Image (cartoon, rainbow, N blue to C red):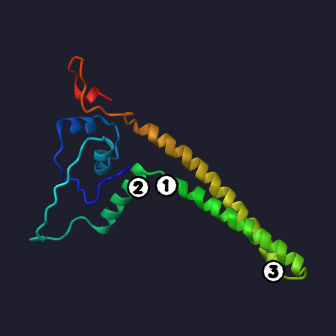
Amino acid sequence: MDIPTDTGDFCLMDRQVVDLLNAMPEQNRYIRGLRSWVGFRQTAIRFERDPRFAGDVKYTFRKSLGLAVNSLVSFSKVPLRLSTYLGLLSAALALFMSVLVLYWRLASPNSPLTGFATIAIAIFFLGSVQLISIGILGEYIGRIYEEVKARPLYTLAEVGGFPDHSRSQIR
């Protein structure tokens, strides 16, 4: 999803957009992303902010970090897929290490490194199996999360040829 940069929570919205956002049953709303998701035309107005006249900034680093995490979780499945990618990477590393241990075993059969490396390979392999399994579960959880949000499949900017109904019923 393409969310415009440098957008804030304060904006001017058409009644159709407001009604559509209010009709969504989500509890944790990332308004900046939802405004883009509904698909209506947006126009940016650039302006220069005056420096703060008095008082301290109330939006702390912790709140900003929470907003960033909320945006990532609301509109991306990448965090759920991260464990799959890490599992595949560690599986490739375990495979590379197995080839290396096999080479060591053939090149110098009495090397003490082969025993340690075999244990490390087993640990990497089992860890990669666990990470890939968690990634598969993450995919299912991501799909469940998308369904539970109950967002409409599409939104309509205009309906013609039908009796006038409340815009909040259009999904």
The Cα atoms of the two marked residues, 3 and 2, are separated by 43 Å
Q: Residue at x 32, y 37 (%)?
A: 24
Callout 3 amino acid: Leu
* Label pair 2/1, CB-CB below 8 angstroms: yes
x and y percent of residue 53 in the render? Answer: 9, 71
129 vs 2, left or right, is: right
The disc placed on residue 78 is 1
The Cα atoms of the two marked residues, 2 and 1, are separated by 8 Å
State the residue in front, 112 or 13.
Answer: 13
**Count of marks overlaid on the render:** 3
Give the crowd class for mark 1: few <14, some 14-19, many >=20 residues within 10 Å.
some
The C terminus sits in image quarter: top left
Give the crowd class for mark 2: few <14, some 14-19, many >=20 residues within 10 Å.
some
Circle nearer the viewer, 3 or 1? 1
Q: Residue at x 52, y 45 (%)?
A: 141
Give the mark nearest the N terminus, 2 or 1. Answer: 2
Give the mark nearest the N terminus, 3 or 1. Answer: 1
The disc placed on residue 113 is 3
SS for tag 3?
A: helix
The Cα atoms of the two marked residues, 3 and 1, are separated by 37 Å
Give the crowd class for mark 3: few <14, some 14-19, many >=20 residues within 10 Å.
few
SS for tag 2?
A: helix
State the residue in front, 128 or 58.
Answer: 128
State the residue in front, 96 or 34.
Answer: 96
The disc placed on residue 72 is 2
x and y percent of residue 87 in the render? Answer: 63, 60
SS for tag 1?
A: helix
48 vs 36, left or right, is: left
